[in-house]
């Protein structure tokens, strides 16, 4: 026999858990179930912020969000994420970049607070319930998995995107919504690394350096971020790169440039390297730029811009070579071949388009259907912005759904 519920929440991640709590607090008499694909709820939360759970940011605005639903951030203007967790028993602090963490720097404390609050209610959690179909009926919805089905008067879709599927959603719910005729913005990995020619970065693997990173499309600047850059196996990453990846969505002919001496103007960089040629005239070129940039980066800049063997000494450098080396330091560029895949990305760009939802996260097409979190076409920058939206949108969707049933 199919069990009946007032509200079925599809997805037990950050937004789904928040929606369940909010709906229950709005109307404690409602029969609510969370349907989670994995064997436990909130697994992706445990991996956020390198296991510390950067759950919000104290310097937050609409400018930190991208996608057709970016304006929905304004619906959260009265949402205080720190207060929400304080009332769940989580003390927090902000670092010098306004990122907010639990004081014990342990992501599990955030998930535990949500689970403990849910344990105080009659909310049911059904794990290993991978939704395979949603049918709209006269009095609600039938939500099915391979082995089971439930009836619900209302559904809150918090199924997430396709990123890190082993920790959360696999994108199957988005495909179901698309079959129902809901407009879906094309999906893409976001907050992820850039792929480059592996040969270009083979000698740089494992290096970290601070830089101003500029993203170009067809040679035109489309974004700029400052921070630590990390070179990997055919990839360039780092928080600043992750943020720029949000702007790469749907773009072609991309490249990035690193200025590793952002506080020094180009003329002064060039003059110092002229001076350095005298200081290190007897030093091998492989050591020429140590003290300015990482040694391996310096060697790469010398190779790309002069063609001399690295065993030659610095006295061979011409004035033209100096110009090229200065340019290499302030405009260390790489052609982007693509974005790392969903398995490497923190979030998913695309999802339910803004035209499908109102500012209270109700579906415009289906009665008693609501959306929240990453299922929507919105992505935030790194720094707690995505979890802030997940929790805030979940609370509003849950409250709206419960009130609409009253």
Image (tube, rainbow, N blue to C red):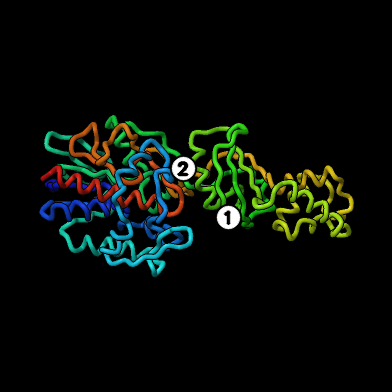
Depth check: 138 or 316 in front?
A: 316
Circle on res. 189: 2
Q: Mark 1–mark 2 contact, CB under 8 Å?
A: no
Q: Is residue 355 above or below residue 238?
A: above
Relative placement, left or right, of 342 versus 217 is left
What is the x, y in percent for residue 48? 42, 57
264 vs 168, nearest the viewer: 264
Mark 1 or mark 2: which comes first in sequence? 2
Determine whether, in the image, residue 306 is placed left or right of residue 383.
right
Task: Examine the rendering and report whether any part of residue 219 can be seen.
Answer: yes
Reply above or below: 126 against 365. Answer: below
Residue 331 in the image: x percent, y percent? 68, 44
Q: Residue at 54% of width from left, 40% of height from top? A: 223
> Crowding at label 1, few (<14), some or many (≥20) Cα neighbours within 10 Å?
some
State the residue at coordinates (16%, 52%).
Answer: 26
Which residue does the numbered mark 1 point to in the structure image? 228
Residue 377: x %, y % from top left:
37, 39
Q: Is residue 401 left or right of residue 374?
A: left
* Percent of width and height locating residue 289: 76, 56
Identify the image quadrant of the C terminus: top left
| Nearer to me, 63 or 50 | 63
Q: How many discs appear?
A: 2
Nearer the observer, disc 1 or disc 2? Answer: 1
Task: Name the residue: 57% across, 50% down.
Answer: 226
On screen, residue 241 above or below 54: above
């Amino acid at each position: 026999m199919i069990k009946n519920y007032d509200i079925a929440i599809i997805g037990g991640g950050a937004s789904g858990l928040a929606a369940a709590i909010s709906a229950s607090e709005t109307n404690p008499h409602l029969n609510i179930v969370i349907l989670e694909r994995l064997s436990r709820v909130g697994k992706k939360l445990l991996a956020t912020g390198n296991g510390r759970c950067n759950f919000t940011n104290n310097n937050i605005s609409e400018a930190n969000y991208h996608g057709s639903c970016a304006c929905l951030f304004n619906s959260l203007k009265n949402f205080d994420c720190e207060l929400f967790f304080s009332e769940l028993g989580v003390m927090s602090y902000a670092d010098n970049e306004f990122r907010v963490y639990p004081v014990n720097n342990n992501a599990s404390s955030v998930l535990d607070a949500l689970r403990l609050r849910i344990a105080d209610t009659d909310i049911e959690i059904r794990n290993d319930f991978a939704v395979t179909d949603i049918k709209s009926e006269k009095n609600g919805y039938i939500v099915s998995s391979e082995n089971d089905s439930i009836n619900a008067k209302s559904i809150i879709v918090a199924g997430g995107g396709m990123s890190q599927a082993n920790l959360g959603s696999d994108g199957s719910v988005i495909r179901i919504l698309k079959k129902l005729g809901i407009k879906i913005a094309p999906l893409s990995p976001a907050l992820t690394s850039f792929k480059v020619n592996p040969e270009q970065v083979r000698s740089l693997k494992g290096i970290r350096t601070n830089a101003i990173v500029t993203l170009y499309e067809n040679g035109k600047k489309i974004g700029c971020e400052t921070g630590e850059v990390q070179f990997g196996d055919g990839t360039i990453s780092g928080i600043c790169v992750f943020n720029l990846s949000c702007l790469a969505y749907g773009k072609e002919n991309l490249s990035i440039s690193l200025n590793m001496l952002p506080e020094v103007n180009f003329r002064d960089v060039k003059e110092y390297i002229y001076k350095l040629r005298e200081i290190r005239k007897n030093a091998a070129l492989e050591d020429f730029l140590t003290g300015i940039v990482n040694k391996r980066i310096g060697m790469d800049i010398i190779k790309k811009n002069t063609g001399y063997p690295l065993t030659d000494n610095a006295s061979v450098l011409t004035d033209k070579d100096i110009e090229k080396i200065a340019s290499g330091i302030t405009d260390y560029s790489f052609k982007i071949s693509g974005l790392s895949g969903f398995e490497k990305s923190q979030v998913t760009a695309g999802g339910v388009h803004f035209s499908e939802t109102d500012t209270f996260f109700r579906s415009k097409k289906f009665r008693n259907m609501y959306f929240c979190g990453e299922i929507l076409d919105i992505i935030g920058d790194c720094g707690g912005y995505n979890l802030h939206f997940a929790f805030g949108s979940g609370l509003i969707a849950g409250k709206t759904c419960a009130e609409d049933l009253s």
